[in-house]
Amino acid sequence: MDSEPKKMFQTLLKQIQLELTEQERQSFDQAEISTVKVHKKVKRWDFYFTFEQILPFSLFKKFETALKLAFANHVEVDVYIQAKNNDVSSQLVTDYWLHACQKSGVDSPICNQLFSSQAPILQDGKWVFHIEHEITQDKFSEEFFPPIIEQYNKLGFPKNLRIIPIVDHHAAERVAQAVIEKNESETAKLTEELTK
């Protein structure tokens, strides 16, 4: 017989009218509602779910969107996921990357372009993220990555997930070369204008 948290989850799926393929439905077969925290003053409900594994990102977004739409006229909804099997693949980290960055609240000219153009990669058993300048390494480690990792954790990723900033010396050289070329070009234009 199904447990009460599993029955509650299946009832919720019906309530939010989430249309699923047979393959998607299998991801929710053993799903449970662990807890719902109601914040009356701010009209927010925090749903805590337990899934067998981390959901594929497209299925997570489909589920989260349906859940938020179903409650939109009443309360704001936030989702917390615990995955029993939280094995992480490069695909999952990449797929969830922009979502985690956006939800983290991290917003800085130092990182925004990098975050939108790349994702962490698995290198020698560690998740690394290539940055351009050594001087920003601590900022990434101490300020940018912790809230992003918190968002990953909130969605079922392991608590020991770490992202290490690694200086990409080739990228730094390309940036430095571009600056030098720009300066040389501007100097040449200025020299040409002054010698006319």
Image: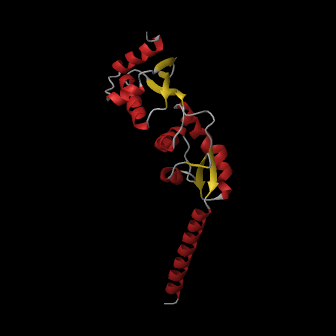
The residue closer to the viewer here, 109 or 29, is: 29
- Residue 23 falls in which quadrant of the image? top left
- Point 32% across, 23% down: residue: 17
> Residue 109's spot in the image, x, y percent?
55, 53
Toward the top, the furthest residue is 1
Front-most of residues 120 and 37: 120
- Residue 12 coordinates in the image, percent (x, y): 39, 18
**Toward which corner of the image does residue 72 lie, by quadrant?**
top left
Q: In this view, does 186 lie above or below 148?
A: below
Determine if residue 39 is in view.
Answer: no
Q: How is the image coloured?
A: secondary structure
Quarter the N terminus occupies: top left
Q: Residue furthest bottom?
A: 196
Count of numbered circles on the image: 0
Q: Please tell me which residue is depicted at 54% across the width and 85% down the height of the picture.
A: 191
> Residue sitting at 43 percent across and 37 percent down?
57
In which image quadrant can residue 55 be found? top left
Instruction: Give the residue at x 58% y 35%.
Output: 150
Q: Is residue 172 above or below residue 107?
A: below
User: In the figure, is residue 68 to the left or right of 106?
Assistant: left
Camera sees residue 77:
yes
Position of 132 relative to 145 (above/below): below
Q: Which of 174 and 26 is in front in this view?
A: 26
Residue 135 in percent (x, y) is at 68, 57
